[in-house]
Image (cartoon, rainbow, N blue to C red):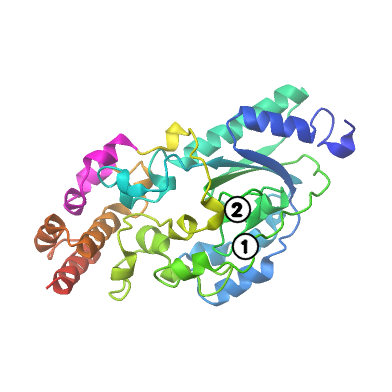
Amino acid sequence: MDDRQGLGPGISAEVITRCGKAAGLTTCGVADCGPSDHGSWLDRWLSAGAHGSMAWMERTAAIRKELTSKWDWARSALVGTVSYLTEPVDRRRLPGIGPFIARYARGRDYHDLLRERLADWCEAIEKAAGRSFRRALLVDTSAILERELALRAGLGWIGKNTCLIGPRGDSWRLIGVVLTDLPPLPPVPPAADRCGTCRACLDACPTGALPEPYFLDARRCISYLTIEHRGEIEAEMEPAVGDWLFGCDICQEVCPWNRRVVPSGEEALALDPRWSQWSLGALARLDPETWRREFRKTPLGRPRRGGLVRNALVVGANLGDPDVLAAARELVDDEDPQVAATARRVLERRK
């Protein structure tokens, strides 16, 4: 295969795919690092304040629209995905607090898993090609538009719920990116948007976080409220949070393209056995020391102790869990203001 079909001597599209599969990636491809085609969408989203308190999104907007403004050596991006649906969609079958956690966060921290597989991918490519290349491994926390790069790499389309949906369906995918100094491949035709007239995700969102197709208002998104939001959850939003302790999968659960997805054998992302031993009541009584020991270095550590207890109180009240309500009575004077305020409010709401 000549260099026009590759990333220079010895690195072809075929090599890229073969090495990605060997590294444990579900799908993989290559995208160019040119300016974003969705910059105006990002500007509109930020102007509407739909990023909530995630101020870093605004601070890094210029980089997201032109990633070479930070990584000036980057020419192409290796983009890989990993499937994280590890059990049937019927979450009620899970023990402990498992049913109340979004699927991507039930097992090992995906940031670590993806970085390892991206590194293995690069090493396999270098070994196959007999040469090295400059790279930066990026997983979720860097100022790039991962989904747009996945779109350019031919790994799917962006659904009305703003998730990446694979060419044959399936949005249960984590995305990892490797910026490289390798020349880009010829562009691939983008996957066609196959959402059609479907409104399942928009109509199913209990908080109205999808006011229109392809526009997610984080301020009303259960994932944002239970993970990124600091402080109390607005009283009017608490009932709509339902039974989601950490994150939310509703817009993916109702997507017709996910109906026939076969769970992967990704054991690292399966339910952590520890979560089977925790109840909502025990979580509501979580003290700072136990949080540091049991949760800080897990996906559930992101909202910190106060946010996790707040969430347990809200979910427990929504479910009418008597143990959580008993815990709430013990927490009305908690040193964390968001915990104390939430405890008082859920008790008032359940009178």
Q: Position of residue 252 (x, y in %)?
A: 49, 56
Q: Which residue is mark 2?
A: 165
* Disc marking residue 195: 1
Which SS class for mark 2?
strand
Locate residue 11 relative to residue 270 in the image: left or right. right
C-alpha span from label 1 to label 2: 10 Å
Assess whether mark 2 and mark 1 are in contact (beta carbons under 8 angstroms).
Answer: yes
Give the foreground label among 1 and 2: 1
Q: Which range of residues does the magenta coloring cover?
A: 272-294
Locate residue 43 relative to residue 33 in the image: left or right. left
Would you say residue 144 is visible in this rendering?
no
Q: Position of residue 262 (x, y in %)?
A: 51, 40
Residue kind at label 1, given as amino acid type: Cys
Queried whether the magenta region covers residue 281, the answer comes back as yes
Vertical relation: 183 (above or below) 228: above
Q: Earlier in the sequence, mark 1 or mark 2?
A: 2
Residue kind at label 2, given as amino acid type: Ile
Quadrant assignment, res 76 = top right
